[in-house]
Amino acid sequence: MILLTCALFMVAAAGCMVPSTSTTTPPITAAGTGAHQTGDAVFLSLYDTAQSDIESALERMNRHFPVGAATRGAPYLAGELRSSALELRALADTSHTSMIRIESFQEKENEVGRNEYLKYLSAIRKVAGNTADAAAAEMDLQFGLAQNYAESARNALKDAVETGETEHRDLLRETGVSLDDYILKMREKRV
């Protein structure tokens, strides 16, 4: 019964999200203004918000690596690193989901920009997810596994740098330094 109810709810919700076929470019109305926004305007707005949010979350994650904690004069806690990495991953997921839903672009360059940014968000998600997994493994005293996850995060970081935003270059470099240090620390703990 519950399964049937959930299925009906999903079908009803999906029907609400299907765009009308009567128009080729359905306008998106801005709340309360009556102004119509194209996919281009929605993308640019989401992009600005995502850029700022990703930057803040990257900074938080970097503060919780051993290097960042030492710089702040705070104790390093793997649980804080894991939490901040999970926060970054969730943010990248949310931004990715919002942007992928944009359907109609009037400017080809905005659609290309959106597609490139989706690649960046995917890479950031991998970096954050692997970092969270490394911290979780460290908390379980599985230092070899933590090292492997951190190395995977470092590899994903290369993709983020290649597809990434120039505004985040310094933060991505800092993340790379933090991951390199973390990998060394896990290697030392294995011995």
Image (cartoon, rainbow, N blue to C red):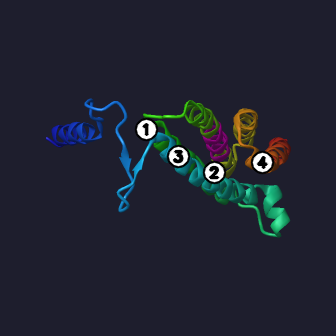
Circle 3 residues within 10 Å: few <14, some 14–19, many ≥20: many
Which tag, 4 or 1, sits closer to the chain's start?
1
Residue 153 falls in which quadrant of the image? Answer: top right
Circle 2 residues within 10 Å: few <14, some 14–19, many ≥20: some
Circle 1 residues within 10 Å: few <14, some 14–19, many ≥20: few
C-alpha gap between disc 4 and disc 2: 16 Å
Which tag, 2 or 1, sits closer to the chain's start?
2
Which tag, 3 or 2, sits closer to the chain's start?
2
Mark 4 vs mark 1: in front: 1
Side of 79 where 37 appears, left or right: left
The three-letter amino acid code for the residue at tag 4 is Thr
For the N terminus, the image quarter is top left
Q: Which is nearer the eye, 25 or 150?
A: 25
Marker disc for residue 101: 1
The three-letter amino acid code for the residue at tag 2 is Gln
Read off the magenta span.
Answer: 123-133
Q: Magenta region's main secondary structure?
A: helix
Q: Mark 4 sits on what residue?
A: 175
Which tag, 4 or 2, sits closer to the chain's start?
2
Q: Is residue 124 magenta?
A: yes
Vertical relation: 143 (above or below) 106: below
Q: Are marks 3 and 2 in contact (CB under 8 Å)?
A: no
Which tag, 1 or 3, sits closer to the chain's start?
3
Q: Mark 2 sits on what residue?
A: 51
Vertical relation: 155 (above or below) 50: above
C-alpha gap between disc 2 and disc 1: 18 Å
C-alpha gap between disc 3 and disc 2: 9 Å
Marker disc for residue 95: 3
C-alpha gap between disc 4 and disc 3: 20 Å
Q: Position of residue 188 (x, y in %)?
A: 86, 44
Q: Position of residue 163 (x, y in %)?
A: 70, 34
Which type of secondary structure does the marked residue at label 2 adopt? helix
